[in-house]
Amino acid sequence: MRLRLDGITKQFPGVLANDHVSIEVDRGEILALLGENGAGKTTLMNILSGLYRPDAGQIVVDDTVRAFRDPAEAIAAGIGMVHQHFMLVPIFDVTDSVTLGSEVTRGPFGVIDRPAARARIVELSETYGLDVDPDAMIEDLPVGVRQRVEILKALYRRSDILVLDEPSAVLTPQETDELFVIIRSLAKAGTAIIFISHKLNEVLEIADRITVLRLGKVVGTVVPAETTQSALAEMMVGRQVQLTVERKDAARGVVVLAVNGLQVRDDRGEITVKHLDLEVHAGEIVAVAGVQGNGQTEFVEALTGLRAIDAGTVKVDGVAIPSDPRAIADLGVAHIPEDRLRDGLVKGFTVAENYVLDAYHREPYSSGIRFHRDAVAAAATQAVADFDIRTPSIATDVGSLSGGNQQKVIVAREFGREVKLVIASQPTRGLDVGSIEYIHRRIVEQRDAGVAILIVSTELDEVLALGDRVAVMYDGEIVGILPAAEATRERVGLLMGGVR
Amino acid sequence: MSSAPMTTTMPLLSAAERRARNNGLVRAGTYAVAGLLALWVGLLRVPGDQLTVYKLVFEESVVRVPELSLPVGMTYAAAGVISLFMAALQFRAPSGDGWRRLMAVTIFALVFAVLTGILGGKEPSLVGLTSAMVSFALPIVFAGLAAVLCERSGVMNIGIEGIILLGACATSIGGSLLGSPLAGIGIGVISGALLGLLLAILSIRYHVDQVIAGTVLNLAAAGITTFLYTRILQVKPELNQPGLVGSTPIPILSEIPIIGPTFFNGSFFLYAGYFLIVVMQLAIYRTRWGLRLRAVGENPKAAGTIGIDVLKIRYRALAAGGAVAGFAGAYLVVVSTGSFQIGMSAGIGFIGIAAMIFGGWNPVGVAGAALVFGFARSAESRLGTVGVDIPTVFLSILPYVVTIIVVAGLVGRVRGPAAAGQPYEQS
Amino acid sequence: MTGFRRAISERVPGWLIWPILGLLIVLLLPVSLVGGLTALVISGAIVLGVRRTELGRQFTDRLKLPVLAILSAFIVGGIVLILSDLEFYSKFAADPGGTLFASFQRVGLAYWELLKGAFGDPGKLTTALASGQPNKIGIALRPISETFLATTPLILAGLGVAVAFRSGVFNIGAEGQLKIGAMFAVWVGIWIPAPGPFHILLALIAGIVGGALWGFIPGILKAKTGAHEVITTIMLNAIAQQIMLALLLSPVLQPVGGTTPISMPIQESAQLPLLLDLPKLRVHYGLVIALIAAAWTSWLMFRTTKGFEFRAAGLNPRAAGYAGMHAGRTIVLAMIVSGGLAGLAGASEVLGTTHYLSPTISPGYGWDAISLALLGGTRPGGVVVAALLFGALRAGGPGMALATGVPIDLLAFISALVIMFVAAPRLVREIYRVKLNATTPSTPRPQETPT
């Protein structure tokens, strides 16, 4: 099995997502597709999997030109996808999830033959060492296992070409290693693998060849042995990139945030934050690492008043926090939420309106019930200049800005007032390198001004680059706190996997 | 740790859990209050010797069965005890899953008591009551099944009411033109399917909000059927005479006292209803079609990425749902009244949606919920002959109040298809 | 001339001209071809003139969708009217061209009668004014007065729906809220003894409170339990209807010895005064109240912090919660305001128009309110204009039915079609091949709300 994409071009309104992209992968080979967020990797894969149709170019499988009109045809041609966001039905069990779309049936009415389907899944799971229980409900499975269910889905459909889109995003370094073992064994068995990532170290470790995408174009293809991280980074971004954030040593002050024995439950009533202790001092950055889904979301929601605290105390400057988000913000706590469009911004509101989203009720933006639009406009105009927000005007819908500029609107809003404590959740998720650098610089500036900063991130690189101290969260607990000097990738990685 | 306002000794629950618990407690409280009220009425307010005599057979029946004499006071008291018992059960497991049955039993008991009380001193026919229950429940079952088909595929169909109305109108005109009620039913079903498709096209192809699309369908149906009624059917009444479909009792089963005439002495619509309930229940949970339908309603994106044609499944589900709703409309015309009347759907479509929710989005549950609603309506219609009274208002708003309580009490316990109401865009 | 033509072809898509032209001619043919063409030229010139300014262009762009939606609805309505004529088919087989022409003419005549019924006959008005007789003036002004009369509750109910939509709550319970408001108001009007203006005020407030209560229920249920407001408001509509019927048959509202479900009349002190003291004119101060309410709503939504919260919660309740707003409280408050406005509509009807309560107090104003809230882009100004249009339909309907025998319910169908076309910009775009800007009326997506 040999796959070639030839001159693929895809235009979206306003964006040329793929511009004559050509890549090639042979059976048994692992091709890495490297590029920043927005480079066009996912679009390319959606074309390959039949979700989008290219405007130009062709897909060649084993020397025959194929045009996939829908995912079913791509699957029939032997292409299997493992999407970044898992494509599973939470209330189905593993057997139903895997067989969905290629069910084993008997009789004229399409009655599902469950024993047969189940047997085949058990067999596949054993052959490739996936260790998946065919009767478990998807919603009860941890992410790592869900990913293996996704791989099982591809294997069940006898895919010869397996595409993995950012597969390590939800895994610990150790789980990633296990995944790599599975990937290598699949390749050995003859599967062609396309591994999509923006993580340089991973790509260098797993790939036979690396194709780099930038702004929808192929920049070049290299072999791991003949390149380095910084060379790859330059290819990916188009200029020299500083891989670390430049900063002075932290000047640690008094304790600003003190969390003691915190316990929080999630929406389903499970205790997801268990007896958590943590302190953040003025003038330092504490970065909390951890694989997604270990209670970070609930932790941050509890700190910011969005979720009830089950037990324990949270104090800011020695005062127990109230249970109301606005009252907490009034204590001088800034919050950059984990999902900008879901939690942080109101799409359909202008840049100016979003700028005052949490301060609209204060002077000078309002007095009593009256809302002063002029004062809002003046302040927003100033903020757009101060934070270099690229927007046609302050009356532009925030939804039409780029991700980086959207995040800048949030940062401007949160940093635009006097704060003692910044709680930033995934502050740079999905941003391009330029925006990441900008946001990181702003955060470090705040630290140098004596603000206490708590960053919660699943990006190990970000945690290591920013944290004066690195705390690792696993299964609702802080399992270790390391000073920056001792926080190596390996040590943090082990802690992320729950190994103390 | 001098001041620790955040620490609390009470075992806290999550918001959803708390909500489910609170709702459960509210339900338990309601049952208890209603039960005490019934006890009070039964023991203190009703003269002890008042009787309601239910006749167990139709007059024309050959078999003689004794009559059922119920002292009104005792009936109230019994209903009160049952309610209190249900309240206790509900109280013991406020957020448990068995609340549907508890609620259904409580409603049945209380409605029956109220009915017996109001009919005090009279000799109503119990079979009349139960068979009216079934004939009121049947269109609700169809409406509920239609709603299940649509919502399982991820499309919220508020427009079932309109489809029923238009289906009824089409049945009447079609049946009259073709001179056969059966042909009329066919026309009604086909037009229902077409309307289902229309809704699908609006919501899927043209991205009209599903709620708006359904509302449009309801309003347009009300407008156009009234228009046609005044413009055509009033002028040419011969176009509004599709004929009636009679009962076909099932030989041996229909001879069973009470149960026979209630469940086995209906038109073929009744048997079609049984068939649909069973077939849909099996199809949704046991077949490839059902698996895909549920997948599309839960996570259409996941279904789409493995090559399932989400939109096709939705189009088909809506057409099927529309056909079933059209069948309900046909039933109203060729079984209930024999002709089309303005506004004859009378909220059945909405109560069907309520039955879907009450029934937990599965066909058998829908049937159970429809029986509860059908009983309330049947009791109401019995009382209508007695004269208007405040309790009649309570009975007539009962299905709506129950629906509100059910919708409000659901959160965290039973969930509908996750993607229902949301548009899905295939690139 | 070529400049003019180019101006037309540049600004208005060629396709569009023909249906509009055709419709106008069909509409005006029964009356006057010359008059119709003049009207066409004048309105065309106005549009082109307005479009020379940036603001004007924005304005006309925003009008494109509603105008096309209304046009399409009337075209479909006309087709239905033709096809529902049973004699059409046999005649068509004999003489296709002639029958078609005659049918078109009949549709045009029906719509023309509708217009006349809604706005009156200009000729009659001038002669009446010239004569100076109040009776004649009253008769000539009656159609437009009836239009304003119907517009009044529509504005109020439409504002209510618009406030809820903007706040992300799909309140389709205006019908029930209106009825409860009418019930509260009529009760105060009948039973509470109070002097003139004070009595009116009291009854109006009672109406607002009643509607607000009926809006509060779905609001609090959504906020506290997540119950879907579409289901609960539909159910509350039915409940309101049943309660109203029961009360109308009980001594609470029914006169002693009454048999029909019609309430006692309200006291004279609770009646809203008429706007014009001319015979035959029923339009009352409710219209002024409605316009004040529109201005107030506009102020509330765009010039107050509460409005800011409403709009934020409507667009993204989650982000509103993260920014420290209370999504639950906002929903409840929005529903109270929404229901209160609808309740005021009911109060204005019983206090100004009927002076008693009957089951037909609302011939579907609450449903029209949904259409016109969408048609007006959920903006208060847009709602007023759209309400005027729907008011005209309501007022002109009887005239149309009387003159041409077309059942009035055609208009209910047409207004449903208007919602459909407004809610389906893609469909309109496909039919007319026009570019519609993205800022078409936003329909709120029912969302799970964090509480």
Image (spheres, coloured by chain):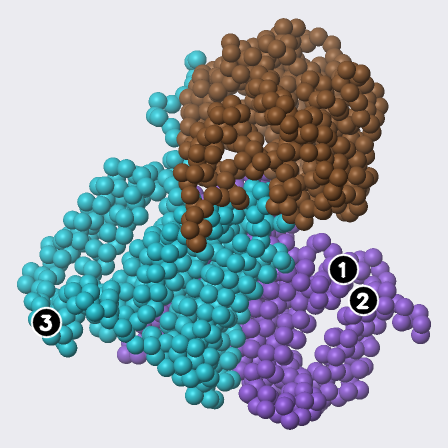
Chain colours: A brown, B cyan, C purple
Q: Please tell me how crowded label 2 is: few (under 14), some (14-19), or many (20+) other residues with Cα within 10 Å.
A: few
Residue type marked 2: Pro
Q: Read off the residue under disc 2.
A: C13
Identity of the residue drawn at 11% across and 58% down: B73
Q: Is residue C261 left or right of residue A303?
A: left
Q: Position of residue C93 (x, y in %)?
A: 63, 90
Q: Secondary structure at mark 3?
A: loop
**Left or right of B265, for residue A60:** right
Q: Are marks 2 and 1 on the same chain?
A: yes
Residue underneath mark 1: C435
Q: Residue furthest left?
A: B49
* Disc 2: host chain: C
Q: Are marks 3 and 2 on the same chain?
A: no
Q: Between C30 and A385, which is closer to the camera in this rendering?
A: C30
Residue at horizontal 39 percent and vertical 79 percent from the top: B181
Q: Amino acid at mark 1?
A: Lys
Chain to which mark 1 belongs: C
**Residue A449 in picture, x, y percent from top left:** 70, 16
Q: Residue furthest top?
A: A486
Residue receiving disc 3? B63
